[in-house]
Every structure is written in structure tokens, then in C-alpha cells.
Image (cartoon, grey):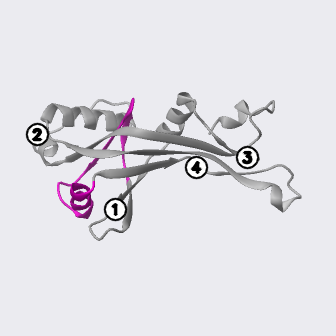
């Protein structure tokens, strides 16, 4: 079983959209790594996040807007031979995105970001009160770099490689 770099956008999109949360890494005000789990919206090459208007992450991002966002599927235990301990692996997929946070302030763009975020969690349409939209902080991240790997899968040249990419 191998870890394989994946370039196919359909697989990358599947890994991202199967997640309920992403992990957002940044540098805090003291220059230390800071990672938080967040709900997200994803469309094209843009990730949307939302938060309160103030807080330690907002202060950190005002100093340094660079972020690293990680998505990972639920790992599944797999093995080549159940009698051989060394053949046990975790199967799954991960995506790492890098970009810069831009805080979206325009009302209609905030509503659009909220709609995209809610599509990640529900097929319903939603309406938002004006105070709710005005009081939410929308983070817009255009993906500048993206990489993806699947792990615990057979060699890409094997017969059942494509079958093993489903998460």
C-alpha cells in the first residue's frame, strides 16, 4: 500500500466536499503556529470561512493573512494480509491549500459566501437577517497552491487502483 500524489481535480474536489470541517493554520500574534477547525464553503478555487468580527485569529490574520487549510477524509483501516502487522495501513485522502485571507465586507458578497457555505451542509435555501450578515466576518481565500495525496492505496498501475480511490 502506498501514498500517492493526486492531481485529478475530481478526486481533490471529492476529498474536500466530503469534509464537515477544515483545519486552518496561521501564525498567531506571537509568531507561533495556530490551527483551528472551521466550517467552510468551497466553490471553484475559493474557500470561504466565517467567524466573529473579533478574536485572536482575526488579529493574527490582520498581521499575516497567509493560511494553510487542510482537509482529510475519515481514515479507514486497511491491510494487505491480516496476519502481517506491517501490512496494516490507514486509507484516506488529504488536500492542503495555501492562500491569503481577504475579509469580504460587501453585503451581497457576504450573502453569496454564506450560501456557498450552507451548500456544504444542506440542500436547502436560506435567508439571512441583515444584522446576521453585517455581524459575521467572511474570510475569502483564493487557493494559490493545492496539493493532494491518497494513502493506503495500491500502486497506481495495479488493476484495482481506481476502485480504491473512493472514500
On screen, residue 55 above or below 79: below
Q: Secondary structure at mark 4?
A: loop
Between 44 and 112, which is closer to the camera in this rendering?
Answer: 44
Q: Nearer the viewer, mark 2 or mark 4?
A: 4
Do labels 4 and 3 touch, CB within 8 Å? Answer: no
Q: Mark on residue 27?
A: 1
Answer with the quarter of the image where residue 159 lies: top right
The residue to which callout 4 is attached is 74
Q: CA distance from mark 2 to mark 4?
A: 36 Å
Q: CA distance from mark 1 to mark 3?
A: 32 Å
- 124 displayed left or right of 13: left
The residue to which callout 3 is attached is 2
The residue to which callout 2 is attached is 130
Q: Position of residue 76 (x, y in %)?
A: 66, 50
Marked residue nearer the N-terminal end (4 or 3):
3
Q: Nearer the viewer, mark 1 or mark 4?
A: 1
Q: CA distance from mark 4 to mark 3?
A: 17 Å
* Residue 49 forms part of the magenta stretch: yes
* Residue 164 forms part of the magenta stretch: no
Dot 1, crowdedness within 10 Å: few (<14), some or many (≥20)? some
Question: Which quadrant is the C terminus positioned in?
Answer: top right
Q: CA distance from mark 1 to mark 2?
A: 32 Å
Q: Which residues are magenta?
A: 38-64
Q: Residue at 47% across / 37% down in the picture?
A: 17
Marked residue nearer the N-terminal end (1 or 3):
3
Q: Nearer the viewer, mark 1 or mark 2?
A: 1
- 43 displayed left or right of 147: left
Q: CA distance from mark 1 to mark 4?
A: 26 Å
Q: Position of residue 91 (x, y in %)?
A: 68, 48
Q: Residue at 80% across / 33% down in the picture?
A: 158
Amino acid at each position: 500500500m502506498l501514498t500517492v500524489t493526486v492531481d485529478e481535480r475530481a478526486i481533490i474536489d471529492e476529498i474536500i466536499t466530503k469534509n464537515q470541517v477544515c483545519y486552518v493554520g496561521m501564525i498567531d500574534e506571537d509568531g507561533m503556529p495556530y490551527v483551528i477547525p472551521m466550517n467552510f464553503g468551497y466553490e471553484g478555487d475559493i474557500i470561504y470561512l466565517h467567524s466573529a468580527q473579533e478574536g485572536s485569529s482575526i488579529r493574527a490574520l490582520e498581521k499575516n493573512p497567509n493560511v494553510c487549510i487542510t482537509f482529510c477524509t475519515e481514515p479507514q483501516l486497511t491491510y494487505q494480509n491480516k496476519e502481517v502487522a506491517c501490512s496494516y495501513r490507514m486509507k484516506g485522502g488529504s488536500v492542503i491549500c495555501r492562500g491569503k485571507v481577504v475579509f469580504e465586507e460587501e453585503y451581497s458578497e457576504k450573502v453569496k459566501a454564506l450560501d456557498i457555505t450552507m451548500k456544504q451542509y444542506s440542500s436547502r435555501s436560506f435567508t439571512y437577517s441583515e444584522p446576521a450578515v453585517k455581524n459575521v466576518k467572511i474570510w475569502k481565500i483564493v487557493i494559490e497552491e493545492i496539493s493532494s495525496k491518497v494513502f493506503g492505496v495500491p500502486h497506481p498501475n495495479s488493476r484495482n487502483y481506481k476502485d480504491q480511490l473512493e472514500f
